[in-house]
Image: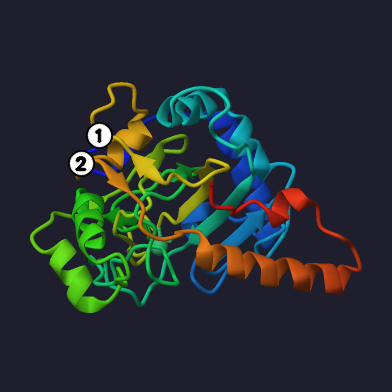
Amino acid sequence: MKYGVAVVRNLVDKAFCDEALDEIRRMLDEDRPVNEWTVDKPGVHFLPFYEDLGRANFESNAVLEKIFDQPRLRAAFEKLHGGPGKWDGVRNYTVMVKPYDPNAKAKIGDTFHEDFGTPPPAILYRGFNAYLLVADTEPFSGNFMCKPGSHIIAQRKLIETPEADGNDPPFRDAVLDGLPTYEFVGKAGDVLFWHHLLYHDGNNSHSENRLPRVAVVGEVYREKWLTEIDADRTDLSPWERSLAQNGSYKTVRDEAQVERHQRAKQIAKFEAEHGVTVDDKWKNYSDWPG
Ligand SMILES: O=C(O)CCC(=O)C(=O)O
Ligand SMILES: [Fe+2]
């Protein structure tokens, strides 16, 4: 809650990680040991798989989507969201592959950001991400790095100026000022949970033993966006508590507006291209409560 990031070691069985890594090898047509992978082959990949038809790149994969069936990971989703049935069960995830780059430097980057491409960012939102390593990494394997605590400062600034762009340099620099950097180095099966306003970055892949970063990152959302948080309640879920660090708050604008607009466009395109009618479930998926 204080950090906006939590790491749980060995949360997912090695057997699933091995299966996922094999599937990624198959997709990338790459059967060499991972320490022989490079930026040229199999290359850097961010491959989205969205069950949600309101997003571009609608695609599914029967092996990789089993990330959402891993029992201890699911239990963690429920615990963070405050019980069963709160997480909406939608299987949206991204495969992230960043292999060794012989020409890169092993250094901390300077492109820390929050993920709302189209500002302004949501102050409360609908959930968090779960980042599963399916192969072991070491420092500078192209790892996820973040600024613990940045989510609280960013949220405070957004409460003051709800229309701000979190990635505008003056805003961002004020958030990051003086915060230490955490690099997620771990073993297959380790999971990092990440708050939606946590500033993060990926480092260059240039590690001692040329280990790549291979991860599957799941979205763990609720069906409805959160519109209000009461910091005095004692029964907040850990996720809700992470949003109450600046006290109680009620949203002053429709935070889903941009996403809903993009979704409507995407669905119209999908319907036109495929000659089908998309289920109302996806048309309403971003609806703002009330
Ligand atoms: O490469 C990384 O780990 C960071 C990726 C990133 O910024 C993102 O997924 O939003
Ligand atoms: Fe990002």
**Secondary element at tag 1:** loop
Residue at horizontal 43 percent and vertical 50 percent from the top? 125
Furthest-right residue in this view = 275
- N-term mark: 1 or 2: 1
Mark 1 Cα within 10 Å, few/some/many (few <14, many 20+)?
Answer: some
Q: Is residue 133 above or below residue 271?
A: above
Q: Is residue 166 left or right of residue 285?
A: left
Residue sitting farthest toward the left: 178
From the top left corner, tell me how far across and down residue 290 is, in percent. Answer: 54, 47
Residue beneath disc 2 = 247
CB atoms at circles 1 and 2 under 8 Å apart?
yes
Q: Residue at x 28, y 46 (%)?
A: 249
Report how many numbered discs are placed on residues in the image: 2
Mark number displayed over residue 231: 1
From the Cβ of disc 2, is ligand 2 less than 8 Å away? Answer: no
Q: Tell me how far mark 1 sits from mark 2, CA to CA.
A: 5 Å
In the figure, is residue 33 to the left or right of 5? right
Q: Amino acid at mark 1?
A: Ala
Residue 13 or residue 210, whichever sits in front: 13
Give the percent coordinates (x, y) of residue 168: 27, 76
Q: Is residue 14 above or below residue 193?
A: above
User: SS of the residue at dot 2?
Assistant: loop
Q: Which mark is residue 11?
A: none
Question: Of 43 and 130, which appears nearest the observer?
Answer: 130
Say what amino acid the circle numbered 2 marks.
Gly
Image quadrant in which you'd find residue 153? bottom left
